[in-house]
Amino acid sequence: MDGPERKATLRRSVRDARRALTPTQRLEASTAITARLRRLPELRTARVVLVYAAMPEEVDVEEAARDLRARGVVTLYPRVQGEDLALVPVTDITSLVAGHRRILEPQGPPADPAIVDAALVPGVAFDLRGGRLGQGGGHYDRLLAGIEDAWRIGVAFSCQVVPRVPRDDHDIAMDVLVTDHSVHRLERHEPA
């Protein structure tokens, strides 16, 4: 099986596992992840954090985003613009509108991605070597490649953690993985 086929098979398998979670299990797991994010040292000193509006089967990080905003942290949400993600400051999630793949996205002028101190990154699957398997469009990998000094924090339900994610040269590794059961510090870098 080649790389793209392995990735497609893994995406199907992990999506099925994630889909098998009940709404109550998703809510409880998202709440546990939010509690871990509140204690995460990488977010304590951050002034600008990239967050995201979760799709129904993803980890909901909005409570963590509200906590960050309450501390005066700027939260940026992604908007798909062709092959790239534009990052837009958001203070009220009700201002988001359905965009690419019906994902809620911000309106307004984008910020410079270089200001990001930490990024909460969704994905389909993660491994404990920093590997992340996204939806397949490469949007986050292209963005993360340009913000090398920011903490890259993967967020996932425990059922999304697999032994090994197939990785290509362009795939960007996570520094930290936060799940409903644990926080994993991964091999990468110390932000400047």
Image (cartoon, rainbow, N blue to C red):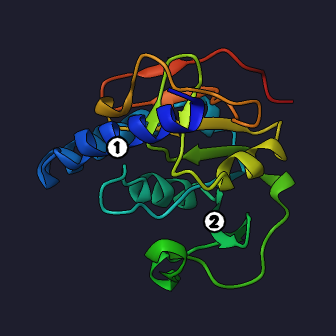
Which numbered marker is on residue 91? none
Judge whether 53 appears above or below 188 on screen.
Answer: below
* Disc 2 element: strand
Q: Quadrant of residue 44?
A: top right
Q: Which tag, 2 or 1, sits closer to the chain's start?
A: 1
* Disc 1 element: helix
Residue topped by disc 1: 12
Whole-angstrom CA distance, mark 2 to mark 1, is 24 Å
At 30% from the left edge and 55% from the top edge, which residue is drawn?
57
At 41% from the left edge and 33% from the top edge, which residue is drawn?
36
At 76% from the left edge and 50% from the top edge, which residue is drawn?
142
Left or right: 106 as drawn, with respect to 147 = left
Indicate the amino acid at tag 2: Pro
Indicate the position of residue 48 as horizontal and vertical percent values.
71, 54
At 61% from the left edge and 73% from the top edge, which residue is drawn?
90
Q: Do we see residue 70 in this rendering?
A: yes
Q: Estimate how packed mark 1 is, as few (under 14), some (14 to 19) or many (20 or more) residues with alpha carbons within 10 Å.
A: few
Indicate the position of residue 13 as horizontal and vertical percent values.
31, 37
Indicate the position of residue 127 as horizontal and vertical percent values.
49, 22
CB contact under 8 Å: marks 2 and 1: no
Indicate the amino acid at tag 1: Arg
Residue topped by disc 2: 78
Q: Do we see residue 39 in this rendering?
A: no
Judge whether 131 appears above or below 72 on screen.
Answer: above
In the image, 35 versus 33, the foreground residue is 33
